[in-house]
Image (cartoon, helix red, strand yellow):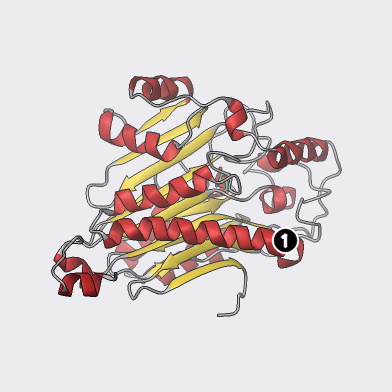
Amino acid sequence: MDSFSMHNSMTTFFPADTATKPIAIAIHGGAGTIRRSAMTPEAETQYRAILTQALEAGHTVLKRGGNSMDAVSAAVMIMEDSPLFNAGKGAVLTADSTVELDAAIMEGKTLKAGTIAGVRGIKNPILLARRVMEHSEHVMLTGKGAERFAAEQGFARMPDEYFITERRAQELTRAKQQDATKPLSPDETPATKPSKNDSLGKNKRSSLYDGNAPLNEWSHEGKKFGTVGAVALDKNGDIAAATSTGGMTNKKYGRVGDAPIIGAGTYANNATCAVSATGHGEYFIRSVVAYDIAALVEYKGMTLQEAADAVVMKKLVERGGSGGIIALDKKGNIAMPFNSEGMYRGCITTDGKIIVEIFRNEKK
Ligand code: ASP
C-alpha cells in the first residue's frame, strides 16, 4: 500500500505528513575502473539487485516516518553484509591479510558524528560508528580501543573467516606482485585519463598508496572498488551521511582512509548537505572533499550539483584524485558525480523515482 492510500484509509501506520514532506536517499557501492566489458551480465545483475535492495531498505525507513540516521544505517548494512562490496563481509585485505574496517556516520541536525578506524571483527562497522556517536564521549575510536568499546557495548566478534573472500585474497596476491613491478609510464595520469591497463591495473606498482606520490604513480583505479555509503533526507527535513569500507587492498601500517575522517569522506549538516565519498582516500583527505562541497554550498551559494562538480570533476581531477561522491540536501536535491570510469550508485528521488547505475553514460 502506498503512503497515499494509507493516509486516505486512515490506517496511519506512517505518520500522516510523510506523504507530503519530501524524503530521498542516495547510495554508492564504490568507484573505480568499472567497465562494462570487464563485467559479466550475472555480476552486473547481482550488483544492481543489492544496490536496489539497499536503496529500498533505506527508503522504507523513511516512508515509515523513520529518521535519516536509521535510513542510512539500514542501506549501508545491506551492502556491508553483501560480499560484493568492500565493506563488512568481502572487504579488501591489508598487507597482513587481515580485514581492518573504517566507518563513519554523521547527523545533519546536530552535527554529531561517530567514526571508527582500523577495526577488526565487527560485522556491521556502521553500527559501531553510530554507537560511538551515541554512547561514548568521543567522535573517533581506532583499532584495539574501538574493539574494546564494541565488546563493552555487547557487539559480537566475528572470526576473520567471516570477512575474507577468495576474490579479495586473489586481489591481495596480485597487488603484492605489482608492488615489485615497473613504474607507470608518465602519460598514465589517474583521474583524467582512463587506465590503458585492464581492470586489475596490471603494470601499476603500489607505491600506489602514497597519496603524496606524483600523479603517474597512481593506484586506486582498478585496485579496488566497493566502499559503500548512503545519504538520506527524512520527513523532518533532517539529513545524514554514512560511509563504510575496508579501505584499499594491501594497505599497510594501520593506514586509515578518508571514510572515517569527518569532512573528508563523510559529512552532514542540515544547513548545507550530506556527503559520502569513495575513491583514493589520501587525495580525499588532503582535499577535505566532503566539507569542501558543503563549504561551497554555504559560503559561495552554489547549488549542490555545482559544488559537487567543482570538487569532484575539477579540483580532484587536477590534483589526481580518482573517485566520486553522493550528496543530498534538505530539499532532496541529489548529486552523484564521479571522475573514475564507473561508480556503483543509486537513488530514490523525492518523487519516488528509483535510479540504479554502474557505468559512465548509462542510457536513461
Ligand atoms: N575511500 C576509500 C579509502 O581510501 C577506498 C574507496 O573508496 O575505494 O579507504
Residue 43 drawn at (x, y percent): 67, 58
Is residue 325 at least partly visible in the picture? no
Mark 1 neighbour density, 10 Å: few (under 14) some (14–19) many (20 or more): few
Lateral position of residue 10 relative to residue 192, left or right: left
Q: Nearer the viewer, residue 360 or 90?
A: 90
Lateral position of residue 213 relative to residue 17, left or right: right
In the image, residue 165 sits, relative to residue 230, either above or below, namely above
Q: Quadrant of the N terminus?
A: bottom left
Residue 251 drawn at (x, y percent): 64, 34
Residue 203 drawn at (x, y percent): 84, 48
Is residue 97 at least partly visible in the picture? yes
The amino acid type of the residue labelled 1 equals Met
Residue 72 drawn at (x, y percent): 37, 51
CB at disc 1 and ligand 1 closer than 8 Å: no
Identify the residue under disc 1. Answer: 39
In the image, what residue occupies the spot 42% across and 25% down? 146
Q: Nearer the viewer, residue 259 or 21?
A: 21
